[in-house]
Image (cartoon, grey):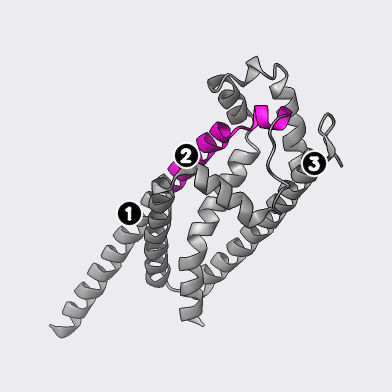
Amino acid sequence: MKKALTILIILSLPFLLILDNTKQIIFDEKYHENLFEKLSIYKEVPNAKAEDENVVSFLKGNPEQINGYDSKEQSHMQDVRTLVQKGTTIYYIIIILLLAGIIFLSTKEISNALMIGSIITLTIIGTIALLNFNSFFDNFHKLFFTSGTWQFSEGIMVQMYSQEFFQECLKKIMTITAIQSAIILAISSCTIFIIKRTENKKRHAKNK
């Protein structure tokens, strides 16, 4: 059981960090507003801030539909909301699994799992950073959405949420996740070092 929990912590950590930071970025209206300014979105969509508030509210599950969007855009936004809801469910399942690991595993076992998990997370982030964003963007949509439902040539959705917008979001998510992983790696490594040092001292004391 302990081995299974250890593996679960190792594999869950990358998903937990990435999902948590993705969720934060999706619902961070202030960050969206800053991006609209940075990317000059307000020139094309003067009421982008109000439109974004409606979108974020929709993704949180409040209104049944978003006003001002055509049927194809409405359908895609519904798919996005469903994906966000599924991601949120997975996020809380992972938290439960991690709590189970904390309860049943020793500090050393938890630290080892977190250290390996953080290394895997950093490896994933490094791999994503090397990928061409346009290819990553297309493959992501092909994986999670039905073909033909997410490609738009014009409309307010394309104007507000351009590939440049999502590229900036991805950079933010990956940067925060990398920092968190590095901190976890440092803390878990130090904890393991201290535990091993304490164990060695006790071992030497017994042999005297």
For residue 185, above or below residue 111: above
Badge 3 marks a residue whose secondary structure is helix
Q: Position of residue 31 (x, y in %)?
A: 58, 30
For label 3, the residue is 72
- Image check: 165 left or right of 119? right
- Image check: 74 left or right of 136? right
Q: Position of residue 24 (x, y in %)?
A: 60, 42
Q: How many residues crowd mark 1 within 10 Å: few (<14), some (14–19), many (20+)?
A: few
- Quarter of the picture containing the C terminus is bottom left
The stretch in magenta equals 155-177
For label 1, the residue is 186
Q: Residue at x 51, y 47 (%)?
A: 135
> Image quadrant of residue 189?
bottom left
First-in-chain label (3 vs 2): 3
Mark 2 against mark 1, which lies toward the viewer?
A: 2
Badge 2 marks a residue whose secondary structure is helix
| Alpha carbon distance from label 3 to label 2 | 28 Å
For label 2, the residue is 171
Badge 1 marks a residue whose secondary structure is helix
Does residue 45 show up?
Answer: yes
**In magenta stretch: residue 181:** no
> In this orientation, which residue lies closer to the viewer: 14 or 190?
14
> In this orientation, which residue lies closer to the viewer: 205 or 165?
165
For residue 59, above or below residue 51: below
Q: Position of residue 22 (x, y in %)?
A: 58, 46
